[in-house]
Image: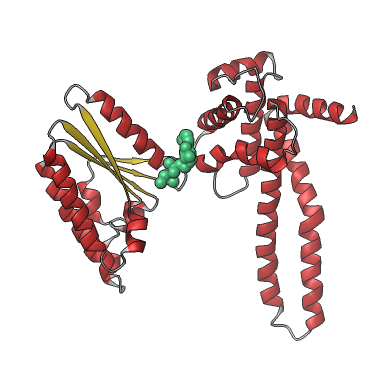
Amino acid sequence: MLLHGSPGTGKTTLCQGLAQKISIRLNRTYKRTKFIQIKTATLLSKFYSQSAKQVDEIFTAIGEICEEDPNQFICILIDEVECIASSRESSMHGEVQDSLRATNALLTGLDRTKDHVNIIILCTSNMPSCLDSAFLDRCGIKLAVDLPRPVVQYEILRGRLQSLIDNGHIMSRASLPPYRDARLELDTDDSLPGSKLLGIVALINTVNSSSPERISGRTLSQLPGKAVLRYLDNADCDLETAFRFMKRNILAENVQGIQKRGSEVKGSSQVQRESTDDPGQNEKTTMITSNDWDVDRVLAVLGAIESLVDAVFPGWKALKRQRDQNSDA
Ligand SMILES: Nc1ncnc2c1ncn2[C@@H]1O[C@H](COP(=O)(O)OP(=O)(O)O)[C@@H](O)[C@H]1O
Ligand SMILES: [Mg+2]
């Protein structure tokens, strides 16, 4: 089975969860399940030039484990399989003989596992287009794992916030409702925690709508802890404060992204101008570009973001009013 998709979409985590489910489902037939995770990137960086030998030895060991106890089910996870399953056609043109031999060893190893019934091999890949066609042909199930949609974004944030609450990092007596309940609550009361978390999700999707990449599960899962760590200054943190920090973090990172993109634009205009004869003109160009991005443009973008959020999520207005009242007080 192959799970493929962008980095941080939860492929490795999903395989680990799947292994656990398999072990529960099969526990009438197999008393035990052994889960073995192979990190191919570490394997190859450690033993470069011996990749094929390493792959071969791993499959020999897997065969022995399968045979030693027929009451045991073996679940193998080959993470980032592209390291040892890269297309042999593209390898032929380069010097990467080692990678070619590793792919051959993987294919032979996979064929050898057919002798055993008590094994499943799960693979993940961030680069499915680089995978060898013979390897793809051997994958019985191929599934694309997409970047999280708003409902999943909400649930990832909810899970992380709840664990910060459970561990005492955020003080809250209220718990966060599942997505469906939060949607229902939003219609009646937009000051409830679930409604506010929906506001954060709306904000994330508004600021990311202009960016080429959507937000990954990994970035989302890090957001609550990162925001609290970044802005909390010795005081206790309640849920309200955590939401405020998260919004600040989302906007601050968006500004950093804009500045980074701005400096890339600035860099390219500088390169073009450097070919002119007038050095003074280069300086002037750089300064105008940098003023442009640092102040006016960033403020304009922030203003635009707020008005967009106003449009897509009316509860945001109430939140803003409340925040303004708090700061007046
Ligand atoms: N859909 C998701 N649901 C819950 N957590 C997720 C999801 N996607 C990513 N994560 C979190 O992001 C982190 C990175 O996920 P990982 O499984 O390593 O992604 P990948 O293998 O696709 O690069 C993990 O901590 C995981 O819990
Ligand atoms: Mg992974």
Q: Residue at x 11, y 40 (%)?
A: 67
Residue furthest toward the bottom? 277
Q: Residue at x 58, y 28 (%)?
A: 167
Q: Position of residue 294 (x, y in %)?
A: 78, 57
Q: Position of residue 149 (x, y in %)?
A: 51, 34
Asked whether residue 29 is in view, the answer is: yes
Compared across the picture, whether 179 is left or right of 36 comes to right
Q: Position of residue 208 (x, y in %)?
A: 61, 43
Compared across the picture, whether 114 is left or right of 213 comes to left
Asked whether residue 205 is in view, the answer is: no
Give whichever of 213, 43 is nearer the camera: 43
- The answer to whether 95 is drawn above or below residue 179 in the figure is below
- The answer to whether 268 is drawn above or below residue 86 in the figure is below
Residue furthest toward the left? 115
Give whichever of 71, 220 is nearer the camera: 71
Q: Quadrant of residue 103?
A: bottom left
Compared across the picture, whether 310 is left or right of 222 comes to right
